[in-house]
Image (spheres, rainbow, N blue to C red):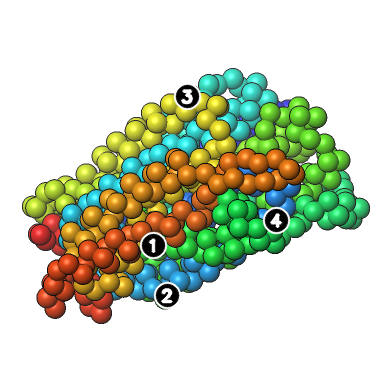
Amino acid sequence: MRQLDLVVIVVYLIGIAWIGLRKAGKQKSAKDYFVGEGHMPWWTVSFSVVATETSVLTVISVPGGAYSGQGFGNVELALGYVIGRVVVATVLIPLYKRGGFVSAYQYLGDRFGLKLQGLASVTFVFTRLLAEGVRLFASAIPIKLLLDEFGVHASYRVIIIVLTLITVVYTYLGGIKAVIWTDAIQMGLYLGGAILAVAVLSAHVGGAGYARAWDAGRFTLFDTDFNLAHILTSPFALPTAIIGGAIFAMASHGSDQLIVQRVLATRTLREGQKAMIASGVFVVIQFAAFSLVGALLWSYNQGKSFAELGLSSSDNLYPEFILNGLPVVVSGLLVAGILGAAMGSLSSALNSMSNSTVADIIHTFFRSTPSEDALLRLARWTTLVWATLMAVFACAFSTSTGNVYLTGLTIAGYTYGALLGAFLLGRLVTRANEVDSVVAFLVTIGVMTYIVRVVKIDVTTGGTTVSQPIAAQWLVPIGVVITLAVGGVLSLFHRAPAAGGGSADGAEPGTGPDQLTATAGRN
């Protein structure tokens, strides 16, 4: 009977590539390839934003976390993310849409100069290569488990290569339109799979099962332990989730090209803002669904530990239920949902990295303006290059890497503070010039590297004291403060820039010709 599941998965893989190419149409220019000429409906962009930030890390880790005692802590985090997205929609998206940009970092080029634009873009693609490499490897873990159950024995390396090859087909040919449409479908598939799992589990455990999970704290939403050490180290402490989460979302959704690119594909500023805010609401719903799966699995398994269930980690909980707790074909659909989460985040990363390479990095080092045909060819070739590098990097991981969710989140802590800080420096410190911004950016990355790798805080729980790293949500505000402080102090040692030099705070950056090519002639 497992053959039916395999048929479902194969049909999905072929179908998603076909739909992506069908929806994309023929690409006529690099701008069309990267932002769809700004003609994408806001609701598809919103779904794409959610699918982009949702990888297998989320799909498999949230249910396991809810099962093991985190309760609905991820929903609490999502509430902070909504606040951050509202700020991004209000403050940053108008800058990007009015400027006619195809890259978030073109604002930095307008405000400070091409050196910071190139530096920010290099930082983005390097961070994204690391983070997406972790995500891609994480995708292979449950997929291998599922395929083994189906009698298909493949190594992590083979799974990574196959996933990359299938995803790169529609990403290479279809550009952002293919990515956004397939993202929207994939989000519906994995979220629908979670809702289907909830329905099956609810039928098994009934009202009594809900009551048992409630009494055991599996529905706990807010972590109200206000001990300072707990707040600084736990991602689920209430101030960390709401305040730290909001600032983290400002960085991830306001200064990370991976997300900004999707919003730039909308038709109008208003639609871009709707897409951004709606994505936050959908994330809350998504986290609630996956957390509910974990809580109901706790009742379904009668609260047994992972060891008692024969599982090596919490990340195996949901895949194991998909294989052994669901009917044939239904389990195939949910496996396809996991594949969808993997391919959605991968395709988005490849297109945004190619975008930033062409629109930011290449224009920083080459003064001539290539033709549209040359830019489109370059966009596609860079997509292939990044796909190859990402697959190689993902293959270098092993199952001993540790918790892949936390690994992926911590990687952002190295650079997100500097990226968001650079944008805020441009908006808040009108005296700051290019040298100030570049020095502040580099200093912040150096300090954050030290904080992430070295700084620990002693936390005492149950009479035992252990050293814990600072919660990932606090890394971004720390980085922002460092960037603003260094850039602000340096700006006091020189005259304020002349009016009209760069884009002052009140000016509209980037007005004029198509920004994909206009920056090539800038200094």
- Please name which of the two marks, 3 or 1, marks the residue nearer to the observer: 1
Quadrant for residue 255, please give it.
bottom left
Disc 3 secondary structure class: helix
How crowded is the residue under tag 2: few (<14 C-alpha within 10 Å), some, or many (20+)? some
How crowded is the residue under tag 4: few (<14 C-alpha within 10 Å), some, or many (20+)? many
Residue that lies at the very extreme toward the right in this rendered image: 208
Kindly check if marks 4 and 3 are in contact, taking CB atoms under 8 A apart as contact: no
The location of residue 159, given as percent across then percent down, is 50, 28
Q: Is residue 170 visible?
A: no
Taking the spot 22% from the left edge, 52% from the top edge, the residue there is 118
Amino acid type of disc 1? Val
- Please name which of the two marks, 4 or 1, marks the residue nearer to the observer: 1
Q: CA distance from mark 2 to mark 3?
A: 43 Å
The location of residue 430, given as percent across then percent down, is 24, 74
Disc 2 secondary structure class: helix
Disc 1 target residue: 481
Taking the spot 25% from the left edge, 79% from the top edge, the residue there is 506
- Please name which of the two marks, 2 or 1, marks the residue nearer to the observer: 1
Disc 4 target residue: 72
How many dots with numbers? 4
The mark nearer the N terminus, 3 or 1, is 3
Amino acid type of disc 3? Arg
Amino acid type of disc 2? Thr
Residue 11 in the figure: left or right of residue 216:
left
The circle drawn on residue 63 is: none
